[in-house]
Amino acid sequence: MFKEPIEILPTVCYTACATLKGPDSHYGTKGLKKVTHESPTASKTCFVFYSSPGNNNGTSIEDGQIPEIIFYT
């Protein structure tokens, strides 16, 4: 969680990194490569997940995503 909201721009790739605490959660199995949200005003927001180089502790696009993204437009 960020202390202040951050702005993200369309067509720009960002890396999200988190340290999760708590019981095992099957490591994010059945994750999605793409998540699209359609608002009541018919606008769409799409998050596309890519593999990230570096220490990912054996996770991939399908296994080990950030558990929740809360956003507003």
Image (cartoon, grey):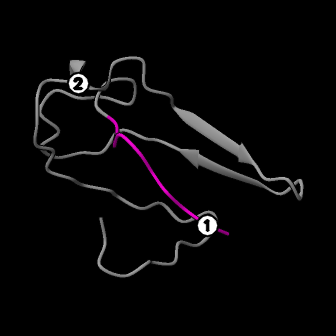
Q: Residue at x 64, y 67 (%)?
A: 10
Q: Residue at x 55, y 44 (%)?
A: 48
The rendered magenta stretch, by its main secondary structure, is classed as loop
Q: Which residue is mark 2?
A: 27
Q: Residue at x 23, y 18 (%)?
A: 26
In this rendering, the label closer to the viewer, 2 or 1: 1
The residue nearer to you, when weighing 62 against 12, is 62
Which amino acid type is marked by label 1? Tyr
User: In the drawing, does residue 22 fall left or right of residue 32?
Assistant: left
State the SS at label 1: loop
- Does the magenta portion include 25? no
Which amino acid type is marked by label 2? Tyr
Q: Position of residue 8 (x, y in %)?
A: 53, 72
Q: Which residue is mark 1?
A: 72
Query: On screen, 9 above or below 48?
Result: below
The residue nearer to you, when weighing 25 against 64, is 25
- Does the magenta portion include 70? yes
Q: Position of residue 5 (x, y in %)?
A: 43, 78
Magenta-tinted stretch: 65-73
State the SS at label 2: helix
Q: Position of residue 53 (x, y in %)?
A: 24, 45
Mark 2 Cα within 10 Å, few/some/many (few <14, many 20+)? some
